[in-house]
Image (spheres, rainbow, N blue to C red):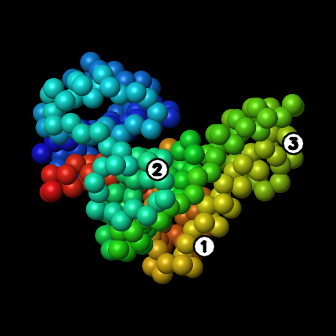
Amino acid sequence: MNNLVIDIGNSGLKLAIFHQRKLVHKLHLQQIDLHQIRQLVDDYGVENSLISSVSQDAEELTNLLKTITVCQCFSSRTALPLINQYKSPETLGSDRLAGLMGARYLYPHKPVLVVDAGTCITYDLIDEKSRYEGGSISPGIHMRLKALHHFTGKLPLVDFESDFEDLIGRDTRQSILSGVINGVLAEAEGFIQKYSQRHTHLQVILCGGDARFFDTRLKNSIFANHLSCEPDLVLVGLNEVIYHQHDQ
């Protein structure tokens, strides 16, 4: 069974082809390209497709895929094998739910904290009984850098430098990098520590565009033995949604 999953986010869309549960092709596009997506379906003999969108209107894409595949649209209303206790499920991002589905597949019957480091940084935990209560959302690295420039009169816009490691900034550029980078790392370590106190044998999964940065910086922490980096977790989770729907 070949599946196409599409995650439409704030900074473009990610597409992945799965042969059963093996990811065989991945593509990132800045905008929806119907011709290219149709070509992918033909090249890989895609039978099933799933679209998840948190930003762009995907009506044309949905109509196309419905004519050439068995197509579903994923949202918070999709039936899942999760006990969702979020009090406003209609506002819960589909990418967060997909990440939890991926976590449940990779680490069944374990409490898992998903740290999705993208435009925003989200922290979501699913426990060993597949229960989800909620989580946290904070600004991502690039959003913090842009906010310091946008909401002040004199602070410059500084590019993210993943190899910056100083605690003390000796000029304005370094001070901004120190504040943002050390701030997000301290935040992540704090969340992981608090969740670890509540859930023994906690597994932490890092995903999203900045996942490898966090993985590099946290690999020497006390949490390293229970830390994994899965940049494609959301795509894996979307593929699991297809399998769940087939099993119903």
Label placed on residue 92: 2
Upstream in sequence: badge 1 or badge 3: 3
Q: Residue at x 37, y 74 (%)?
A: 128
Distance between mark 1 and mark 3 Cα atoms: 33 Å
Left or right: 208 in relation to 174: left
* Extreme residue toward the top, this view: 35
Distance between mark 1 and mark 2 Cα atoms: 23 Å
Label placed on residue 194: 1
Q: Nearer the viewer, mark 1 or mark 3?
A: 1
Q: Residue at x 60, y 66 (%)?
A: 191
**Count of labels shown?**
3
Q: Residue at x 57, y 68 (%)?
A: 192
Q: Nearer the viewer, mark 1 or mark 2?
A: 2
Task: Give the x, y percent position of residue 247.
Answer: 14, 57
Q: Helix, strand or loop at disc 1?
A: helix
Left or right: 105 in relation to 226: left
